[in-house]
Every structure is written in C-alpha cells, then in structure tokens.
Image: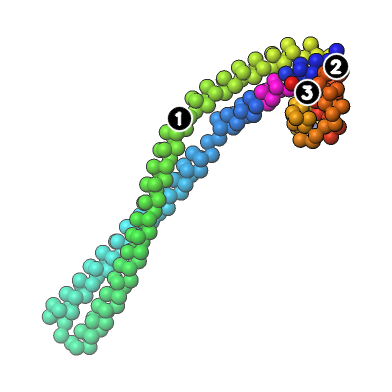
Amino acid sequence: MVSIKQLYDLQELDWELSTSENSLVEVRAKLADDSALVSTKKRLEQLESQLAERLSTRSQRESTIQQLGEKQKAIEGRLYGGAVTNPRELSAIEEERVFIQGQVGEEEDNLLELMVEIEDLQTAHDQTREQLVQLETKRSAEYPELLKAEEKLATELDELHQARADMTPQIPPVALSVYETLLKSRGGQAVAKVERSMCQGCRITLPTVEVQRAKAAQEIIQCNSCHRILYVA
Ligand SMILES: [Zn+2]
C-alpha cells in the first residue's frame, strides 16, 4: 500500500534540498565574484595614467611660459634700455613685444584650463581610491563568512541527501517513479495538499468524490487539472 504521507514528506525534503542547493550556488557565485573590485581597480589605473599625462603636459606648458617670459623681458630691455634709438627699429621691437605678450596670454589660458581638468581628475582619482579601499575592506570581511556559509550548506546538503537515501527504499517503486516524473515535469512539486477541497498545486476546486478518495489515501489520486498527487492532511 502507498503511503501518501510518505510522498508528502519526501516532497518537503526535496523542497529543502532544492532551497539548500540554490543557496549553495548563490554563495559560491558570491565567492567567485570580485567584479566590483576588478572594475574599480581598472578605473583607478585609467585615472592614474590620465593624471600622469596631464601633469607632464602642465610642466611643458609652464616651461614654455617661462621661456616666453624671459624673451619678453629681453625685448623690454631693448625697448626701454635706451641703446636703441632708431624709431623704425623701436617700432619693430614693439611689434615683437606685443606678439610675445599675446603668446604668453594664450599659453596662460591653456594652462588654466589644464589645471581645472587636473583638479577634476584628482578628485575623481581620490574618490575612486577611497571606493577601492572600502570594497577591499568589505570583501575581506565578507569572504570568511561566505566560506563558513558554504561549508554549512555543504554539510546540510550531505545530511539531506542521506535522509533521502534512507527514505526512498520505503516507498513502493511504482509510486516513487510517478513521484519522480511529476517532480521533473511539474516545476519541482509532485505532491499538492488539498485544502478546502482545493488543490494547492493549481488552485482548482476538486470534485467531492476525488477529495474523499484522496482522503482515504489508499492509492495515488492525481489532480485532474495539474496531475499532482493529492494529499489530504
Ligand atoms: Zn491541481
């Protein structure tokens, strides 16, 4: 004789098994996932190389401005030093002075723009570095916890598999085979409880005669809608 209660107990065990298996998969995925750390490290490296490039451009521009300044000073020396008196020559020097002054102004504007850019990059760099430190701290705190959880779940699963191996030989092979087939085809639920004449697997109301037969629990009665094995507690 088939005990429907046994099948129901097996169903509960299989649910527990599937929950633990899913949790284990989740924990293992978390253990393997260091994508946040990797992407933040990569971003920090990018910012570092951008900063280095801009800082080198800044020194180039600063030295250009310094050279232009020296040139300007030399021209002013010639212009106001009194050594040159020829008005045509003086006017040519003045033209040169104005030209250099314009160049200095242009270079100074460029430098200012660059310094704003460097400041923004520096801010982004510092924030990213801070983020990385936080991520590393979080990861190193989380990792041992995840390992512990993994071990606990693995032990639980071993026990559940053992319990299943103890339980199944007590169920008649034909009933077990019906159960296993339904378990696969019905989304992991082979047995459905009947409550208020309703199959809890598909929520359909069952004919009274079906409920009575299920209640007698002398044989496997399947829901005529979802085909799950009916169990009346
Ligand atoms: Zn049903």
> Does 220 sit left or right of 81 as displayed?
right
Disc 1 to disc 3, C-alpha distance: 48 Å
Check the picture and name the quadrant holding the N terminus: top right
Q: Position of residue 185 (x, y in %)?
A: 80, 31
Which residue is located at x 69 percent, y 17 percent?
Answer: 161
Q: Position of residue 115 (x, y in %)?
A: 33, 59
* Of the image marks 2 and 3, the number of the one nearer the N terminus: 2
| Residue that numbered label 1 is attached to | 140
> Does 29 sit left or right of 60 as displayed?
right
Q: Give the extent of the magenta segment.
A: 11-18
Picture disc at residue 231:
3
- Whether 33 is drawn above or below 209: the answer is below
Disc 2 to disc 3, C-alpha distance: 11 Å
Which residue is located at x 87 percent, y 27 percent?
Answer: 209
The amino acid at mark 2 is Gln
| Element assignment for label 2 | loop
* Main secondary structure along the magenta-highlighted residues: helix
The residue nearer to you, when weighing 148 against 219, is: 219
State yes or no: discs 2 and 3 in contact (Cβ < 8 Å).
Answer: no
Picture disc at residue 13:
none
> Neighbour class for label 3 at 10 Å: few (<14), some, many (≥20)?
many
Check the picture and name the quadrant holding the C terminus: top right
Q: How is the image coloured?
A: rainbow
Picture disc at residue 218:
2
* Of the image marks 1 and 3, the number of the one nearer the N terminus: 1
- Whether 73 is drawn above or below 79: the answer is above
Q: Position of residue 178 (x, y in %)?
A: 84, 23
Hey, which quadrant is residue 13 in on the image? top right
The amino acid at mark 1 is Ser
| Element assignment for label 3 | strand
Q: Can you name the residue that lies furthest to the left here?
A: 82
> Neighbour class for label 2 at 10 Å: few (<14), some, many (≥20)?
few
